Amino acid sequence: MEPNKEDNVSLTPTAQITAPPVPGFSALPPVVPPSFPPPMAPIPMMPHPPVSRPPTFRPPLSQNGETKTSDSDSDSDDEHFEISEGSRQVRERQEKAMQDLMVKRRTAAVAVPTNDKSVRDRLRRLGEPITLFGEQEMERRARLAQLMGRLDMNGQLDKLLEAHDEDAAPKEEVDDDVPEYPFFTEGPKELREARIEIAKFSIKRAAVRIQRAKRRRDDPDEDMDAETKWALKQARNMVLDCSNFGDDRPLTGCSFSRDGKILATCSLSGVTKLWEMPQVTKKIAILKDHKERATDVVFSPVDDCLATASADRTAKLWKTDGTLLQTFEGHLDRLARVAFHPSGRYLGTTSFDKTWRLWDINTGAELLLQEGHSRSVYGIAFQQDGALAASSGLDSLARVWDLRTGRSILVFQGHIKPVLSVNFSPNGYHLASGGEDNQCRIWDLRMRKSLYIIPAHANLVSQVKYEPQEGYFLATASYDTRVNIWSGRDFSLVKSLAGHESKVSSLDITADSSCIATVSHDRTIKLWTSSGNGDDEDEGKDTMDIDL
């Protein structure tokens, strides 16, 4: 086969084409052919490799056309694969998470009543408790929604349908012959009379307090700032006046008489001693009748008598000469604190049986057994008007009770550990509480919330007490061996009384705020009084000018 001639032709850029000469004409210039790029060789086409397909497995057929089962398949059916412990836990977590997700979806899809009364009725019909201790309305509705979602998830729709039918069905008329039982426990007749007496007493006291507050506000001669400054100066100048051993065992409580001439102390030995003021060196009387350790002592605000509490589950009423007047029995566990009502006719006691009780000191009868705390009740205090009582417990709550109706009107939540002491301010609307979280909280009864948080001590606060006249300052005792005095206006630290060598268990302030008594586990009684040493300039500034 001859090669293609066109493929062999190649023109170079220097080649010239010359025409032959013609007679009679001049010679023509040589013609230069145009230059062309050299042709490119054709690119050979590579054939695509064939696509290989995986072989298709076809089970062998038997003679009658059925598929044969190999021996390996039959062996695999009999094999059991064991799952590791980690894989099993992962699978359980996944199943639980999936179940919780489905319950949440069901809960979101279920129609839950918004009225609290309807929520309670629905919980009752489903056989669940209508309320839990400390449960709010939104928490109760969320609990009902979760319950309904879980029942719907489990396919127990009959209960839901029955509940819906009962809600929609008209209520049947109650037979008049069936007696209706109250939802509360009826108190004795003496309690009703006591509530009436307390209401009359509190109305008079509140009227006097409000009238005095208005006079101090409107009278131009009343300089409240100067009085507050003078009282805080006296507290700032307090120093240790005297110290004495009170007992062979640690002291647990102390209290001044209403005139400030007698100081009572109690100890773990169960003995209560009365000391003559101003130097606690002479004993007036020794009160011995408790079978176990004494936990608290307090003087009556109107009479020359005092009450003691003990771990033998009893409280006792004494005269200052050592005569036993009454024994209050009824608590099921050891007592913690004791307090007199401002009228002096009633006594309040707290106990580790989760109750606090109100007693008539004249008859010794138990007027009120009040529950409400989920754990032991420790602190108790009465408002100076006499209308309200405050209790604190190991459930980290402080409750305010209306003695005229018996209702719990306020619940203060904020402490994260047990609350050991409460005390009302003389203004009537501030409440101080101290507990094992080393804090002292100031609560406002008008705003129903915490007004101020004082990081009071480095250890638990065993007792808090307001200055009894106007509440100019607040004193706190602690297990860090110190007693701190705080301003009643801005709650700043005024003075820190250091002198005890062990835990300070209790304190008290005289009626004229001139002396503070503290007792400790170091078995000593210490009296702190104002030294009166101050600069003349400051004394002149703090003194109020009164026009006669």
Image (cartoon, grey):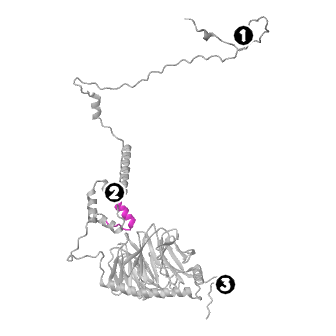
Question: Could you say which is closer to the camera, residue 122 or residue 520?
Answer: 122
Residue 319 point in image, percent of width and height: 40, 87
Residue 222, located in which quarter of the rendered image? bottom right
Q: Which mark is residue 69?
A: none
Q: Earlier in the sequence, mark 3 or mark 2?
A: 2
Q: Main SS type for the magenta part?
A: helix
Residue annotated with mark 3: 536
**Mark 3 or 1: the one toward you:** 1
- Disc 3 on helix, strand or loop? helix
Residue annotated with mark 1: 17
Residue 440 vertical placement versus 202 (above, below): above
Q: Are marks 3 and 2 in contact (CB under 8 Å)?
A: no
**Mark 2 or 1: the one toward you:** 1
Residue type at mark 2: give it: Gly
Q: Separation of disc 3 and disc 1 at Cα?
A: 136 Å
Residue 55 point in image, percent of width and height: 37, 24
Q: Separation of disc 3 and disc 2 at Cα?
A: 76 Å
Residue 344 point in image, percent of width and height: 41, 86
Residue type at mark 3: give it: Asp
Crowding near pointer 3: few (<14 within 10 Å), some, many (20+)? few
Residue 265 relative to residue 133: left or right: right
Q: Are marks 3 and 1 in contact (CB under 8 Å)?
A: no
Q: Residue furthest front?
A: 24
Residue 531 point in image, percent of width and height: 59, 82
**Mark 3 or 2: the one toward you:** 2
Question: Could you say which is closer to the camera, residue 105 or residue 540?
Answer: 105
Would residue 505 be seen by someone viewing this image from the given angle?
no
Residue annotated with mark 2: 149
